[in-house]
Image (tube, rainbow, N blue to C red):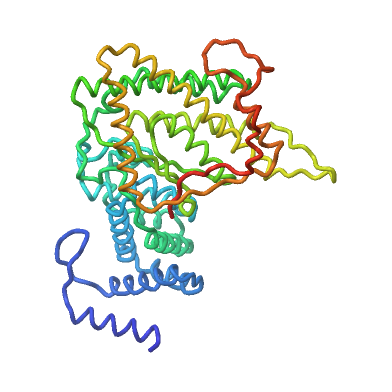
Amino acid sequence: MGTRNRERRATKQRKRDGRRHNPRAGASWARTEGDDRAEAAMLLGAHAAAVGDDAALSDAAVRLATCGPAGARLLDHSLVQLVGILYSNGWQPADIALVARRRLPPAKALIAAVITEEAAHAGWSGAQLHRRWRAQLADLGAWPPPPGAASGALAPAVAAVPGHERPAVCAIAFRLLALLHELPRLAELLPPPGQAHSPLDADVPAGLDAKVLGKIRGLLAKAESTSFPEEAEALSAKAQLLMSRHAVDAVLVGLRGGLDEPPIGVRIAIEDPYADAKTLLLQAVAGANRCRPMWSAKLGFSSIVGFEADLIATELLFTSLLVQANKAMLGAVVPARADGRRRTTSFRRSFLVAYASRIGQRLAAATASAVDEATGAEADGALLPALVAREDRVERTMEQLFPDTFSRSVAVTHHGGWVAGSLAADLADLTIGAPLDPHRARPDDQDDPYAAQALPGAATWG
C-alpha cells in the first residue's frame, strides 16, 4: 500500500473517531483537517529522521511547515513529552543539552526552549527540585520559567524565520525528536523532579561555607590564568588543601549535627581529543576527594558519585587542572624523529597520562595531610571512622548504580610525552611556601613508569 493511501485511511479513521483528547491541555477538542495533516507529516518526518532518509525528511518538513499552529503544537508536545520521559530514565537537563549540542549543533537553541517549556508545564516548585537540578535549568535559561514559556518551543522558532526557511526549522526538530528517542536509560544520580526537598535559598550544600568556596574558586582562577607553571601548581595544591580541610569540616558538622545526606552523582563532560587520557586526570582528582568516577565513552561523559562537598571539590579542581594541563601540553615542544616527523598525537596523549599520574600522587598527599591535621585536632577520634563510613557508602552506591563495569587501560607510547607530562606536574612541592628545587629527584626516578607501557584506565561502562 502506498504512503498516500495509508495517510488517507488514517485520516478517515481519525474522522470517524470524532472528538479526541488533547494531551497538553487536558481537555476535549475537535480535530480539524489541519491537525490530521500535521500528525501525518510529523509521523513521516520522525520516521525519516530516524532512518536517515533525507529526501523523505525534507518532504515531511515542508508539509508540516504548511500546517501552521497545528504542526507546531504536535511537534512541541512530542519533544516536551520526550524530555519528561528522559528525566524519568535518569537524564538531567544538562545531559540532554550536552548530547544535543554535540550530535545536532543546529538544535542547541531548540532543546533549551523545549527544556524550558517542560519546566513550565510540569509546574514543580523550587523546593521540589534538587539544587543541582535548579542550577542546570538556570544555566539553560529555564529556571525560573520565563513568562510565556508554556506557549510552545517550536512555534516561536518557526515564526522567527521567513516562510521559505520554516521547513529547515521543522527538519531540525524532526532530527532532534529522533535523537531523543534513541538515548538509553542512565543511572539515576539525582532525585528526579518532585522527589527532592531542597531549600530555595541553598546556593551551597549544608556544611559548606560559601566564603571558603569563593576563596577556592579564586585560587583556581589564578592557577588557570598564570603563565608560570610553578605558581599554577602551588595555587592548585593550596586549593586542594582548602578543599580537603573543608570537606573534613563538613564531616565533623554532620557528626555533631546529625546530618545524613546520601551520596549523589554528577556528570562531567570530557571532550575529545584525548578523552581517554583526560579521564585519568578526572579519576585522580575524584579519588583524592573520596569520589568514584565512571566513564562512558559512547556518551562522552563521566558519572561521579560522592558527597556534595567532595563533588564540588572534584568539579572545581578537575576543570582548573585540565586547563593547566592543556596549556602546558600545547606549549611543550614535540621532539622530532630521525626522519624529521613529529608524533604529536602520541606525544600529547602520553603527556596527559603522565600528568594525571603525577597529579594523583600529589593530590593524595595533600588530602592525607589535611586529614592527619584534622584527626590530630579531634579529641574524640570520631573523624577517621566517619570518613571510612562515608567511603563505604559511596562504594555501595557506586555498585548499585553501575553493577556491570570494566576497566580499560590507556597505553603510553611516547617517552618524550611521558617525561614532559611528569615534569609539568612535578614542578612544585605540595607544601605551600616551600622553596622549589628543580634538581631534586622525583620519587619514581628509580623505577621509570614508562617501562610499564600502559597505565590502568578509568572504570568504564557502556
- Relative to 122, say whether 419 is above or below: above
Residue drawn 50% across and 21% down?
Answer: 237
Residue projecting furthest to the bottom? 1
Q: Which residue is drawn at 37% across and 30% down?
A: 310
Image position, residue 373 (x, y; %): 39, 14
Q: Which quadrant, please, contains the N terminus?
A: bottom left
Residue that protrudes farthest toward the right in the picture: 339
Residue 332, by quadrant, is: top right
List x then y, in percent, for residue 273. 59, 46
Direction from residue 403 to residue 129 in the image, left or right: left
Q: Quadrant of residue 62?
A: bottom left
Q: Position of residue 246 (x, y in %)?
A: 36, 20
Q: Which quadrant is the C terminus positioned in? A: bottom left
Taking depth in this image into account, of 148 and 287 the one nearest to the observer is 287
The reply, left or right, for residue 7 in relation to residue 127 is right
Position of residue 223 relative to residue 33, above or below, is above
- Residue drawn where x is 38% and y is 44% of the image: 94
Residue 419 image position (x, y, % from top left): 68, 32
Q: Does residue 354 appear in the picture of this structure? A: yes
Identify the residue at the far front of this view: 446
